[in-house]
């Protein structure tokens, strides 16, 4: 717990924390600004309705979270890599070990701090997006009658929990890569490369790529669970037809990637030769 609290205090002061989440908030605002402008300028009814999807509640609650996670997933990879890589580049890991800290405990506590800060950043950026959507709805004359829709709000805690799990897993990928490479730049570069390579490969071998981390995270957030479809088996059939995993299976796969990445990072830190 002491190492975790120390990690939180350290991350709060890190420029990478502010840069990452200000970038995410800025991109979310730009998207909603573009949507608002498009809604105001639309001349056809169909175009106007499509432009207002992100400004119309209750649907906007989930759509804005999708935007935040869609952009935030890649940023979580780079943030995890930046923090893990800096431990080697700046010599803080070596200093911690020199004063008698456990290697695996230090790595695990450091990652736990990254996850908590990432979750807080996600919630803040999501709040920014919701406020921007409300302002955009007022500017475009879109009704806010669905803002307090209880059925949609009841689904949001589960969706938020899955979103948090997805971000934690994506951060763990960057964290593990940077730990193995002992470099911020290598961790960020390889993490981004894996992110886009997986997306390209999914076009050619979707049956295999759907088990990979980012595809599994997307499936987990898509809501194709059989439990959500009348008849029980409908969700699995839909997931199969779209090349995605069923949501419940995707959760297990994401957890496996998260635990696996952290085990790799912890074991690598435990066995690494630290000299100089």
Image (cartoon, rainbow, N blue to C red):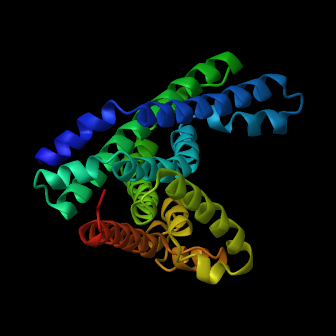
From the viewer's perspective, is 179 left or right of 34? Answer: left
Quadrant in which residue 105 is drawn: bottom left
| Residue at 54%, 64% in the rendered image | 214
| Residue at 43%, 76% in the rendered image | 249
What is the number of callouts on the image? 0
From the viewer's perspective, is 265 left or right of 203? Answer: left
From the viewer's perspective, is 121 left or right of 45? Answer: left
Q: Nearer the viewer, residue 113 or 146?
A: 113
Q: Is residue 56 visible?
A: no
The residue lying furthest to the top in this view is 139
Quadrant in which residue 42 is drawn: top right
Quadrant in which residue 119 is drawn: top left
Location of residue 52 with respect to 105 vertically, above or below = above
| Residue at 12%, 50% in the rendered image | 99
Q: Is residue 122 visible?
A: yes
Location of residue 58 with respect to 179 vertically, above or below = above
Q: Nearer the viewer, residue 22 or 271?
A: 271
Residue 86 percent location from the top left of the image: 39, 47
| Residue at 40%, 63% in the rendered image | 176
Residue 29 percent location from the top left of the image: 61, 28
Question: What quarter of the picture does the C terminus occupy?
Answer: bottom left
Q: Nearer the viewer, residue 16 or 209?
A: 16
Residue 101 percent location from the top left of the image: 13, 55
Residue 160 percent location from the top left of the image: 40, 49
Q: Nearer the viewer, residue 176 or 184?
A: 184
The residue lying furthest to the front in this view is 276
């Amino acid at each position: 717990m002491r190492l975790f609290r120390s990690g939180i205090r350290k991350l709060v002061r890190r420029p990478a924390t502010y840069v990452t989440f200000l970038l995410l908030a800025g991109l979310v605002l730009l998207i909603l600004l573009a949507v608002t402008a498009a809604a105001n300028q639309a001349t056809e009814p169909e175009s106007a309705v499509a432009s207002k999807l992100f400004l119309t509640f209750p649907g906007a609650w989930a759509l804005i979270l999708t935007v935040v996670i869609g952009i935030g997933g890649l940023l979580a990879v780079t943030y995890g890599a930046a923090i893990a890589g800096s431990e080697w580049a700046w010599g803080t890991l070596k200093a911690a070990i020199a004063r008698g800290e456990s290697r695996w405990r230090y790595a695990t506590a450091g990652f736990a701090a990254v996850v908590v800060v990432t979750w807080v950043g996600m919630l803040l950026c999501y709040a920014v997006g919701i406020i921007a959507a409300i302002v955009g709805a007022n500017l475009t004359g879109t009704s806010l009658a669905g803002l307090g829709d209880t059925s949609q709000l009841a689904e949001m805690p589960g969706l938020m929990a899955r979103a948090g799990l997805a971000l934690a897993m994506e951060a763990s990928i960057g964290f593990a890569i940077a730990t193995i490479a002992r470099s911020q730049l290598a961790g960020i570069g390889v993490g981004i490369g894996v992110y886009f390579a997986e997306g390209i490969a999914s076009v050619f071998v979707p049956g295999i790529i759907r088990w990979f981390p980012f595809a599994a995270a997307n499936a987990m957030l898509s809501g194709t669970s059989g439990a959500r479809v009348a008849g029980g088996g409908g969700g699995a059939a839909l997931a199969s037809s779209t090349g995605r995993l069923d949501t419940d299976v995707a959760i297990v796969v994401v957890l496996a990637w998260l635990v696996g990445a952290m085990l790799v990072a912890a074991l690598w830190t435990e066995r690494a030769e630290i000299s100089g």
